[in-house]
Amino acid sequence: MFPYYTNCMSSHTVNLDRAIERASVYGKRVRVSNGGAKAVIVPEEDVMLLEAIENYLDVKDVKKRRKNASASKTIPWSIARKKLGM
């Protein structure tokens, strides 16, 4: 799906510095592992884009749920608080 640079963390500090540089300076995604554990170092822009997509989907979901909610299916917050003992 996306191009990755795979890096085995044998000499941890040097390789981690290199992986961070590839992500932050060159915009590359870097897969790293230390035997069994695996992770991906990504550019900050990728994280910001994923967060924006998640926020968009959350807002879309809320709008859909509000549209589908009718007065008979919902209860006022004051009553819900009392039922929950708040």
Image (tube, rainbow, N blue to C red):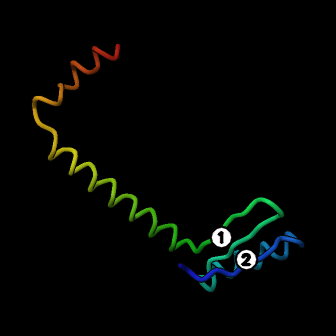
Give the camera-side residue of 44 and 71.
Answer: 71
Q: Which mark is residue 41?
A: 1
Q: How packed is label 2: few (under 14 Cα within 10 Å), some, or many (20 or more)? A: many
Residue beneath disc 2: 19
Q: How packed is label 1: few (under 14 Cα within 10 Å), some, or many (20 or more)? A: some
Q: In the figure, residue 51 lies in which quadrant?
A: bottom left
Mark 1 element type:
strand
Q: Residue 43's spot in the image, x, y percent?
A: 58, 74
Q: Residue 15's spot in the image, x, y percent?
A: 81, 76
Q: In the figure, residue 38 lies in which quadrant?
A: bottom right
21 is higher (above) or lower (below) than 77: below
Q: Residue 58's spot in the image, x, y percent?
A: 33, 53
User: The disc labelled 1 sits on which kind of residue?
Assistant: Ile
| Residue at image point 69% right, 81% down | 5
Give the camera-side residue of 38 and 82.
Answer: 38
| Residue at image point 21% right, 51% down | 63
User: The disc labelled 2 sits on which kind of residue?
Assistant: Ala
Q: Residue 76's spot in the image, x, y percent?
A: 18, 25
26 is higher (above) or lower (below) than 86: below
**Marks 2 and 1, the one that precedes in the sequence:** 2
Answer whether labels 2 and 1 touch (C-beta < 8 Å): yes
Image quarter of the C terminus: top left
Q: Residue furthest left?
A: 71
**Separation of residues labelled 2 and 1 (CA atoms):** 7 Å
